Amino acid sequence: MDFTVRPVRPEEYERAGELVAGAYLADGLLTFGEDDGYVHELRDVRRRATAERAEVLVAVDGDGRAEGGRLLGSVTFVTAGSPFAELSGAGEGEFRMLAVAREARGRGVGEALVRACLDRARELGARRMVLSSTPDMAPAHRLYGRLGFVRTPERDWYPLPDLPLWAFVADL
């Protein structure tokens, strides 16, 4: 790999937030574009990175030590009880807001970020990892399947009446 996955640094909060919001906007995942209320949550990396039971990980070009390294992707890992947990229950880890910069796609960044979350869940003694995804995110669904996630319709949910979120679960 020509990049490193590590925890986000405070000086990267703004850049990481713009990366995540930018990816969601570019992929048409926000119904109301810049006016979508969720875009503000995507940009608020500081809040996620400093929240209890939440960690923001980033993929950075090179060895990740240099300041100002180019951010390639980001993900938020949470455990049950986190203010950012949507699906996770006791003994489960969860990840959210996975995003890879367009120019970094195809380099294995998304897979590395998901694997880092799986590793973190195992370190914490979790038995399962869960996630939510919109039905139209087929490339992400293929990645999840390769990494052992199984579609779990009984855990699907609707944060808004017209926004179904599919659940995926992987045993660790």
Image: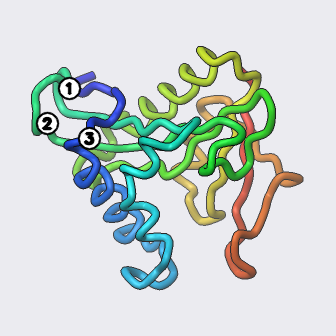
Q: Which residue is mark 2?
A: 69
The C terminus, quarter of image: top right
Local crowd size for mark 1, using a 10 Å CA cut-off: few (<14), some (14–19), many (≥20): some
Residue 68 left/right relative to 134: left
Identify the residue at image location x=23%, y=44%: 12
Query: Is 28 drawn above or below residue 155 in the view shown?
Result: below
Q: Secondary structure at mark 1?
A: loop
Residue 50 point in image, percent of width and height: 43, 42
In this rendering, the label closer to the viewer, 3 or 1: 3
Tell me which amino acid carries mark 2: Gly
Identify the residue at image location x=65%, y=35%: 79
Local crowd size for mark 2, using a 10 Å CA cut-off: few (<14), some (14–19), many (≥20): some
Query: Is 158 drawn above or below residue 126 in the view shown?
Result: below
Q: Contact, CB < 8 Å: mark 2 with mark 1?
A: yes
Q: CA distance from mark 3 to mark 1?
A: 14 Å
Query: Is 132 drawn above or below residue 73 in the view shown?
Result: below
Residue 87 left/right relative to 105: right
Lower position in the chain sequence, tag 3 or tag 1: 3
- Of residues 148 and 11, the one nearer the viewer is 11
Q: Which residue is mark 3?
A: 10
For residue 129, the mark is none
Lower position in the chain sequence, tag 2 or tag 3: 3
Q: CA distance from mark 2 to mark 1?
A: 7 Å
Which color scheme does this rendered protein use? Answer: rainbow
Which quadrant of the figure has residue 166? Answer: bottom right
Q: Which residue is mark 1?
A: 64
